Amino acid sequence: MEKLLHNQVAFVTGAGSGIGRAVAIKLAQNGGKIALVDLHKENVEEVKKQIEEIGSEALVLEANVSQPTEVKNCYQKTIDQWGRLDVVFANAGINGEVTPIEDMEPKDWDLTKFILTERNRFYNRDGVPPVPVIKEKRTGSRTSLGERENRPC
Ligand SMILES: NC(=O)c1ccc[n+]([C@@H]2O[C@H](COP(=O)([O-])OP(=O)(O)OC[C@H]3O[C@@H](n4cnc5c(N)ncnc54)[C@H](O)[C@@H]3O)[C@@H](O)[C@H]2O)c1
């Protein structure tokens, strides 16, 4: 039986650890080819191996998702590699300082908010690569962790 994501391409940020890693592997198990984006490419080398063992393909991409130019380059490399983009899972981010709230420094809040806000703003704006690419096909989805919904395009 053909897999749900047969021949489709997914772009997963923060794919080197935790939720992003688990989602990347699950999408690959369902037949997806996965662009693995992370701050440090060493984080995703192992995930690429796991995906290849499953029998799918993966592309290792290093980027800081709070820097639009770096993310745009990653989208371009993904499209150059596979010629399409079907799913964006905007997951990369930091959980911030884990400490009692009374000990939390304003700078810790600021960094966490900056990364999460920039990330969501960037992935959901028209004119930014994944939105027009997915809209043109009239199918696919983009999900930003922390938003309340998965947006079909
Ligand atoms: N784990 C939780 O309980 C929880 C709860 C609420 C929200 N979240 C959010 O879910 C997402 C994933 O959480 P997790 O627990 O799997 O995190 P994690 O720390 O295990 O993994 C995050 C990954 O994102 C990468 N990353 C961090 N900043 C980046 C950046 N600027 N550019 C590119 N890559 C970057 C890291 O290198 C890491 O591989 C985060 O955005 C987090 O804020 C997590």
Image (cartoon, rainbow, N blue to C red):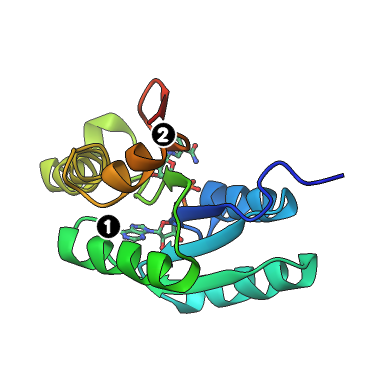
Point out residue 39 in the picture as x, y percentages from the top left corner. 35, 68
Point out residue 149 in the picture as x, y percentages from the top left corner. 41, 22
**Disc assigned to residue 65:** 1
Label 2 close to label 1 by CB (< 8 Å)? no
Question: Which residue is pictured at 26% across the width and 52% down the height?
Answer: 129
Query: Is 52 left, or right, of 22 in this rendering?
Result: right
Question: Which residue is pictured at 50% across the width and 59% down the height?
Answer: 15
**Disc assigned to residue 8:** none
At numbered mark 2, what does the secondary structure look like: helix, strand or loop?
loop
To which quarter of the image does residue 57 belong? bottom right
Question: Which residue is pictured at 44% across the width and 76% down the height?
Answer: 41
Ligand 1 within 8 A of label 2's CB? Answer: no
Residue at which label 2 appears: 138
Query: Is 65 left, or right, of 9 in this rendering?
Result: left
To which quarter of the image does residue 62 belong? bottom left
Q: Nearer the viewer, residue 84 or 102?
A: 84
Of callouts 2 and 1, the N-terminal one: 1
Whether residue 115 is visible, yes or no, is: yes
Ligand 1 within 8 A of label 1's CB? Answer: yes
Question: Which residue is pictured at 77% across the width and 68% down the height?
Answer: 55
Mark 2 and mark 1: span between their CA atoms? 25 Å
At numbered mark 1, what does the secondary structure look like: helix, strand or loop?
loop
- Give the amino acid at mark 2: Arg
**19 shown above or below 139:** below
Task: Check disc 2: other Cα within 10 Å, few if <14, some if 14-19, many if 20+.
Answer: few
**83 shown above or below 46:** above
Point out residue 6 in the picture as x, y percentages from the top left corner. 69, 51
Whether residue 67 is visible, yes or no, is: no
Task: Check disc 1: other Cα within 10 Å, few if <14, some if 14-19, many if 20+.
Answer: many
Point out residue 34 in the picture as x, y percentages from the top left corner. 55, 60
